[in-house]
Image: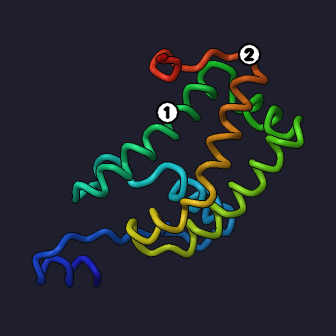
Amino acid sequence: MYADIARSTGGTDSHFNTNTSNPVLMVFGGVTATFFRPFLWEVNSPIALLSCAESSLFLFLTLFFMYKKGIKLFFTTAFSDPRTLMCFVFAFVFAVAVGISSANFGALSRYKIPCMPFYLIMVILIYQKAGLNYPGWFNKK
């Protein structure tokens, strides 16, 4: 329906949904939407491109760690230190709530602002605790 309205008025459509009623998949979809969307193929404006760049950075940092050290170490390291655990719990609970309840990328980009610093701090602490070097572009001085 929204796509039809956007096309008829000449605007662009920025709505999305998780396309499931399974609670487990909704949690996964909410976290994915909050931390890693919009993807590049979903961008339809210059502002969305900036949001895409931010989301791509978080996706790259997360996937780089999981590629180098594994998914299991990502979560065990997050739960091994009270600082990372607090960041994990806040960021993921907030991400689930925001990702499931947001209907478009504009609202999502505004609502996710409080949890993104906690997610970034958690990722940086996990990199440090696992002894993994940051990507080369991250260490520029």
Position of residue 3 relative to residue 110, above or below, is: below
Label 1 sits on residue? 60
Q: Secondary structure at mark 2?
A: loop
Q: Secondary structure at mark 1?
A: helix
The residue at 77%/28% (across/down) is 73
Badge 1: residue crowd in 10 Å (few <14, some 14–19, many ≥20): few
Q: Are marks 2 and 1 in contact (CB under 8 Å)?
A: no
Position of residue 98 relative to residue 37, above or below, is: below
Q: Position of residue 79 (x, y in %)?
A: 85, 40
The residue at 58%/62% (across/down) is 30
Horizontally, residue 133 falls left or right of residue 9, namely: right
Viewer-closest of 70 and 90? 90
Label 2 sits on residue? 131
- Nearest to N terminus: mark 2 or mark 1: 1
Comparing labels 2 and 1, the label whose residue is closer to the camera: 2
Q: Position of residue 45 (x, y in %)?
A: 22, 59
Give the image quarter of residue 130.
top right
The residue at 60%/56% (across/down) is 31
Give the image quarter of residue 120.
top right
Residue type pointed to by label 2: Gly
The Cα atoms of the two marked residues, 2 and 1, are separated by 18 Å
The residue at 50%/73% (across/down) is 102
Horizontally, residue 116 falls left or right of residue 33, namely: right
Residue type pointed to by label 1: Phe
Horizontally, residue 84 falls left or right of residue 120, namely: right
Horizontally, residue 76 falls left or right of residue 55, namely: right
Q: Position of residue 47 (x, y in %)?
A: 29, 57
Viewer-closest of 78 and 115? 115
